[in-house]
Image (cartoon, helix red, strand yellow):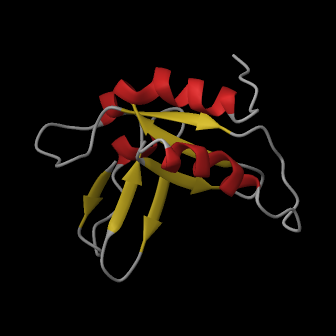
Amino acid sequence: MCRLAPDSQIPAWATERGFFCLARTAEELSIVCAEDCLPDGIVAEKDWVALKLEGPFPFSMTGVLASFIQPLADAGIPIFAISTFDTDYVLVKRDTLRASLQVLANAGHEQKL
């Protein structure tokens, strides 16, 4: 995850491969992308792993994301959530991955590899 100035152009490295997410507001351009795509000198929050909630979820379905992140919050595990049209992704720090998966399993979520 990195933050650029709000008027920054979308850099080519941000969209080079795999999963990425771009969000522009009046305050920033936020980029979530593969860590190894980041060039030197970019200030970034690193070591996050994305967990995909198996979708698609209809917009009328409520509580899906909450049922996933509440157990993590209760366990004191920081998250970063991203939603798309079809599904949700929850990012956790790499060093909390094992604990996160255990917390989610205890809450009744199944893991698919």
- Judged from this view, the residue extending furthest toward the top is 113
**Does 109 sit left or right of 36 as displayed?**
right
**Does 49 sit left or right of 1 as displayed?**
right
The structure residue drawn at horizontal position 35% and vertical position 41%, both measured from the top left corner, is 13
The structure residue drawn at horizontal position 74% and vertical position 32%, both measured from the top left corner, is 109
Q: Is 103 in front, or is 64?
A: 103
Figure check: 57 above or below 18: below
Residue 47 can be seen in this image: yes
Q: Position of residue 16 (x, y in %)?
A: 44, 37
Q: Position of residue 67 (x, y in %)?
A: 70, 50
**Does 28 sit left or right of 64 as displayed?**
left
The structure residue drawn at horizontal position 88% and vertical position 59%, both measured from the top left corner, is 58
Residue 29: image quadrant is: bottom left
Figure check: 57 above or below 26: above
The structure residue drawn at horizontal position 29% and vertical position 74%, both measured from the top left corner, is 6
Residue 20 can be seen in this image: no
**Does 51 sit left or right of 88 as displayed?**
left
Q: Position of residue 89 (x, y in %)?
A: 61, 45
Figure check: 68 above or below 54: below
- Judged from this view, the residue extending furthest toward the left is 41
Task: Pick the quarter of the image with the C terminus.
Answer: top right
